[in-house]
Amino acid sequence: MSAIRTDKGRRLLAALAVDVGRPLSHELLAGRLWDEEPPPSAVASLYSHVSRIRRQLRMAGAVESPGSPHDFPTIESRSHTYALRADSHSIDWHRFVDLSKNARRLADTGDDIQARTVLGRAEEIWRGEPLAGLPGSWAQSTRATMADQRLATTLLRIEIDLRLGRFGEVVPELTALREERPTDERVAAHLLVALHGAGRQAEALAVYPAVVRRLHADLGTGPGAALTRLHERMLTGAPLTGPAARTPPGPRPAPVPRGGAVPSPPPGRHMIGRRDDLRRLLGGTEDTVEQGGVVTVSAILGMAGVGKTTLALHAAHLMRHRFPEGYAHLNLGAHVVNQRPLTPPAVATALLRRLGVPAATIPLDSEELFAQCADLLATRRAVVVLDDAATAAQIRPLLPTAPASLVFVTSRRRLAELPGSRPVFLDILPVDDAVALFTSVVGRERADDRGRIVEIVDRCGLLPLAIEIAASRFKARPSWTLAHLAQRLSRKTGRLAEIRHDTESVARAFEMSYRSLPVEQQEAFRLLGVHPGPDIGLHAAAALLGRPVDETDHLLEALLHCHLVQEHTPERYQLHDLLKEYAHVLIRDEGGEEEAGIALRRLLGFTLRAADQADRLLYPRRSRLALPTFHQLPGMETLLYELDLDSNDAAREWLDTEQAGLIALATHARAAGHPEATAWLAHVLAGHLDAQAYWSEAHQLHQAAATYWRSASNDRREARALINLGATLANASRYPAAQEALQRGLTLARAERDDDATAEALSLLGGLLWHQGTLVEALALQEEALQIRRDNGDLWNTARCLANIGIVQRTLGNSTLALSAYKNALPLARQFRDRTFEMRILNNIGDLHLGIGELAAARAEFEQVLAGAKNSMSSFDLAVVKANLAATLTIPDELERAVGLYRQALTVFRSVGGIKHEADALNGLGHVLRTAGRAAEARDQHSTALELARSVGTTREEAAALRGLGLAEAALGDTAAATGHLSASIALAAQVGAADQVDLATEAMAGIQKHMQSDG
């Protein structure tokens, strides 16, 4: 991996190499690279890393095997997975594991000498720390697993050395291991045997008391039966038959299972997918068990219906041959109707009986009972499934410190207090696995429409229990089609009622979890279903529940432990969509509509105040109305204070995090009978939605706000809503609709004598006319807005008007007047410390230099903006700057960078619907491609730009596209087409007064005509 220089690249190759030959999903690999918190761009980044590693593998293959490059490792991709295809013996770890397994098999057949030789080869492979230098939790846990494997291999080699009589040779190594692992009874047993065999009786006798002291001090427990018997045999002088001893070579009788049949997956339950979960659950068990490693408790945790029991029984079934000395599956009854969960003594008694212990020998005393159960699990290699545990206390007393058995525990609660356990949290199924589960139940004959099945499993929330029930119901109704089932599951209400079959239903599984909660937790669960967003923050939840933050935090943590809510990021909570629907059912069936209505009003009051506070921090000079004083809810001021919206960064982070929830809440509030609250939310969010280019969402909110204020006959507020609506439509290149909204807003603002709103409407209308190429009228409107701002002493908005005038003057070809306007605006922006505004003015100055051919000066301005913008500009504004910078680069020397900048800008423009800017960037991309000699590609870009410009009526970009097409056709040798396009460009630009475009097209026409004359 030395040729791979990035941590992410090295971690990716390591992740693939550890599972060589096994396809790994993009999601799994992203989790390993980003520690279970992958960014939105994770899949794209993953692709880039894979591409680089493939290239380096090919280069290495060419060097190492020039004659047979196909024999060298490669990364294969298929159906959203990657797999490393390579000889496993070329990877040290797999060679080490294979040699260790071979040695175990040789030792089991009595060939200790050959086994010892193989183990020596295995240990030669181990050089230093595995995955050295790789950061991250996956690398750390993998190192720990590998270290356990190495310890198991080392102990196997020591066992063989002891059987071969090499007692003195292994004492130093065992002494060092004991220092590292003072409570490991395997190491202590080996050391005791080695010291005894080497004639060091006093030291051998001291081993057992030392271990007893450390176990009591560190773990609060005593030694296991095996070590105790070994010590007692040494005291009596009996031959030692500890871990190093074994029966003479010969056929080994198969162990007789005790206490139950070998487990099989439960009838009616289908184990589909879950390979990654199964791998995490077993955690290397298949290898470590074969080497004699200790297997710890695995706790399988998740919400009702997610498939915990199915996974546990499937894992037990897979491990039946490794743990052949017994099997027990106990339902601990945490969610059995009309039955209390089993007590710890009842669990211990039932477990002993299932494992074949005679009833007469099972003690009645709890302490003796737990001790016997722990001793049995510590010495017998059995598989135990403890299903549906209520708490860790229910099973903790009967588990030994180091079980020889494999114990699986399932629970709907988080069992953080279970010592030595390895939690595996189950989530919903991936879509492909969900489709496969549905198909396995209904049969391939009826599963003939994947699109419909995807719709069905999606409506089942990708929850295994829901999918199985829906599939079983479909299977039992031969007249139903997939379309009919999908339609039934798509009803707005009653979806839970549809997911039922015979006596099973998802709602029943949810009900058992819900009814086990205390009253205050039941109320919290119901009210969380009121929130319409994808997730909810702690403070918003406190407002919704009407409780203090600390109390809300405790309630959410309790629901989290029961897996009734999920926490994907710190202090962001969400309900699975079926659980949310169940909460709605509870509100409806238990008469909670009034309770839910009060909760929604609390949430709206808090959200409006918080959003207004964040808006005033980020956009202090934005044109706005004062928020009315709503009815103050108890504790609201304290809640807002604890939210800590005390800086621009905090305000921006809150708005970005809450974005989806704010939009959903505004939409839901309108439907729930709170249109005024929706209208005010639209108003306080206008600055954020505009700055972050959320134009689609803003359009809906502002349209609804304008409609509401019109129905309420409030012209002043309607004017503001229409102005916000017009600004949004203009940004989205919907110019006719924008002009209509702004004209009506301007009329209302003038009638209300609202100077601030009037000037805002004039300025926005001027910008709109500039986009459409009506430049003289645009300039007049901007100058009228400027006069109002100056008359009112509004310096910040004066600077905005000056900047807008500069843009129009530059387009009219008045470079000196444009630069003067920019230079007058810039000090005001700096006076108000408005970094975003300052960067926009500098970008405009750069655009001015670009328009008059001063490329070096323009480039300097754009580079300065990109270097200084940091978090002060939105992704949209930065995309504009990148497109401008690309136009200044030297072609063909900097072609790759120029194309990259244009591509980045186009991605942003397309994502927000900025058609005018998309056309502008396509024209720029066409220009650099033609300059680089790629005229055919340039023509394609200009053709697309022309279509976009005409679709929204932006004449400047249309004229530029025609000029670009003319130059591209000329380069391709079609002079007639070239002159036709250039003539059209000149006429259009002259018609709207775009002097700069007239000059550029005229210059291009003159060049073509000169070339034609020289050819003639």
Image (cartoon, rainbow, N blue to C red):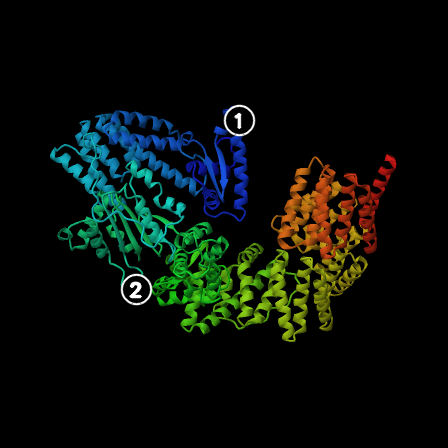
Residue 468 relative to residue 350: left or right: right
Q: Is residue 608 visible?
A: no
- Find disc 1 in the rendering and name its residue: 62
How crowded pointer 1 is (Cα within 10 Å; few <14, some 14-19, many 20+) is rated as some
Q: Residue at x 81, y 46 (%)?
A: 1000
Tag count in the figure? 2
Residue 531 spot, x, y in % from top left? 48, 64
Residue 196 spot, x, y in % from top left? 18, 30
Q: Residue at x 46, y 74 (%)?
A: 594
Frontmost residue, 387 versus 687: 387
Residue type beneath disc 1? Ala
**If you read the primary sequence from the N terminus, does the residue marked by circle 2 or circle 1 appear first?**
1
Per the image, label 2 sits on a secondary structure element best described as: loop
- Find disc 2 in the rendering and name its residue: 337
Residue 350 spot, x, y in % from top left? 21, 54
Residue type beneath disc 2? Val
Residue farthest along the top direction in this orientation? 67
Residue farthest along the bottom direction in this orientation? 713
Frontmost residue, 83 versus 387: 83
- Tell me the number on the disc at residue 869: none
Q: Is residue 797 above or below residue 219?
A: below
Q: Are marks 2 and 1 in contact (CB under 8 Å)?
A: no
Residue 840 relative to residue 68: left or right: right
Q: Is residue 495 above or below residue 290?
A: below
Per the image, label 1 sits on a secondary structure element best described as: helix
Residue 292 relative to residue 886: left or right: left
Mark 2–mark 1 Cα distance, whole angstroms, equals 67 Å
Q: Quadrant of the C terminus?
A: top right
Q: Is residue 760 visible?
A: yes
Rendered image quadrant of residue 585? bottom left
